[in-house]
Amino acid sequence: MCATVLVTACLSASCQTSRIVGQDVKSVVNGQPMDNTQLKSALASDTKDMEANLKVVRGKLLQAYAQLRANVQKRWGQNDAKMADRTVYVKYTQGYQSRVVTDFDHGSLTIETVDDKDPQGSLRKAIVTALLTSNDPGTVDLFTDKDVDLDSKRRPYLYGLVNDNAGKPIRTRARPKHLQTTWSARRSRAARSKGTRARRPRVL
């Protein structure tokens, strides 16, 4: 979401070329000849602006990534700070104590928590979030632990990939109710990593 906003702002800044092209279109509609004398300079100016804006965007993304890693390491330790990449979706919630890791290349879903006060409750909440997260990337902020907006009108990104105990796709809060209990009670296992103790139900 953060990246989308930054890139949108960057692209919207380049408008001189669009303005001149728009003027040429109006001229043609009115039966007048096009004037392309300013087009070359407008393209050069917009290209320069775009390069400068993209440099700013890259810098802000690197800052956001570094801040995310620092926040995660405080909870999970330096050796277990998992981050999202091109094929792995990682979303932290609940003060960076819980996370969802979806590995699309290996077809696995791992939901973990280091909450030592109410690990089962945190797992249940994380499971619901994982199963009902929308397929719209704009609803998820991967750079913070901000809660995911679970929009029931949108299809979950795991719809049809993870089914409930009856073999039916999960789309509403009622559907994963029994499933989350099964995962938490039967499939969770304690896993030790340096400085952390994580509980994780894993689905392959």
Image (cartoon, rainbow, N blue to C red):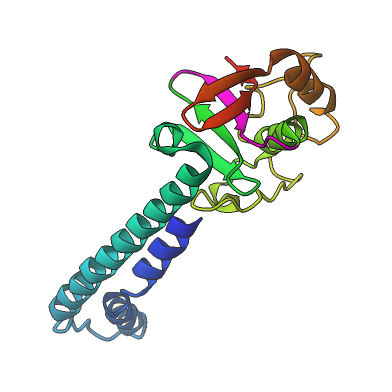
Left/right placement of residue 140 relative to residue 120 reads left
Depicted 82 relative to depicted 42: above or below: above
The quadrant where residue 126 appears: top right
Q: Position of residue 1 (x, y in %)?
A: 51, 55
Residue at 34% across, 79% down: 22
Q: Is residue 152 magenta?
A: no
Q: Position of residue 35 (x, y in %)?
A: 19, 84
- Foreground residue among 107 and 10: 107
Residue at 41% across, 69% down: 9
Q: Where's the C terminus, which quadrant?
A: top right
- Foreground residue among 135 and 198: 198
| Span highlighted in magenta in the image | 106-117
Q: Position of residue 25 (x, y in %)?
A: 33, 77
Q: Position of residue 141 (x, y in %)?
A: 54, 52
Depicted 138 relative to depicted 184: above or below: below
Q: Is residue 111 magenta?
A: yes
Q: Is residue 168 visible?
A: no
Depicted 161 relative to depicted 95: above or below: above
